[in-house]
């Protein structure tokens, strides 16, 4: 694993498509849920949306835990923290 892959995976987010799939609605509906409640196109989400999003959050948490384990194993296997920041001398 290199630092670019690790940063990309760490920064990955849950997409509107994944949320729509979890809620059983269209992506357009998800976007309408996010609008201000006084916007003409606003839609209220169906009951139970909290449970569906909590499940997605738990899944993302598991993915991040797995990433942390892989990074720690990589550091242990190589014997050096390749992604650790290096200290620079202060400028005079």
Image (spheres, rainbow, N blue to C red):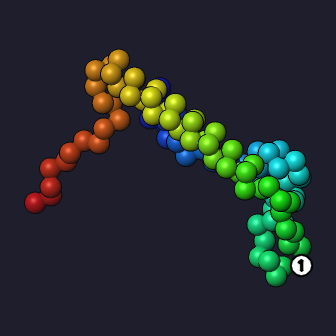
- Name the residue at 85% across, 68% down: 44
In the figure, residue 90 lies in which quadrant?
Answer: bottom left
Quarter of the image containing the C terminus?
Answer: bottom left
Q: Tag 1: Cα neighbours inside 10 Å, few (<14), some, or many (≥20)?
A: few
Q: How many marks?
A: 1
- Name the residue at 80% across, 55% down: 48
Q: Residue 3: percent from the left, percent from the top?
A: 44, 35
Front residue of this view, candidates 8 and 24: 24
Is 33 on the left-hand or right-hand side of 15? right
Identity of the residue furthest to the bottom in this view: 38
Identity of the residue furthest to the top in this view: 77
Asked if residue 17 shows in the view, the reply is no
Residue picked out by circle 1: 40
In the figure, residue 12 lies in which quadrant?
Answer: top right
Front residue of this view, candidates 49 and 65: 49
Identity of the residue furthest to the left in this view: 92
Element under disc 1: loop
Q: Residue 11: percent from the left, percent from the top?
A: 55, 46
Asked if residue 59 shows in the view, the reply is yes
- Name the residue at 81% across, 65% down: 33
Using the image, determine if residue 16 lies above or below residue 63. below
Is 75 on the left-hand or right-hand side of 88? right
Is 72 on the left-hand or right-hand side of 60? left
Using the image, determine if residue 66 lies above or below residue 79. below
Using the image, determine if residue 88 lies above or below residue 31. above
- Name the residue at 76% across, 66% down: 34
Q: Residue 70: percent from the left, percent from the top?
A: 46, 26
Front residue of this view, candidates 24 and 78: 24
């Amino acid at each position: 694993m290199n630092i670019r892959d690790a940063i990309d995976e760490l920064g990955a987010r849950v997409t509107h498509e994944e949320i729509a799939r979890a809620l059983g609605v269209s992506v357009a509906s998800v976007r309408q849920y996010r609008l201000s409640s006084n916007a003409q196109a606003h839609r209220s989400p169906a009951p139970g949306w909290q449970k569906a999003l909590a499940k997605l959050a738990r899944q993302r948490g598991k993915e991040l835990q797995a990433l942390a384990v892989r990074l720690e194993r990589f550091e242990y296997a190589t014997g050096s923290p390749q992604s650790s920041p290096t200290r620079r001398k202060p400028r005079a």
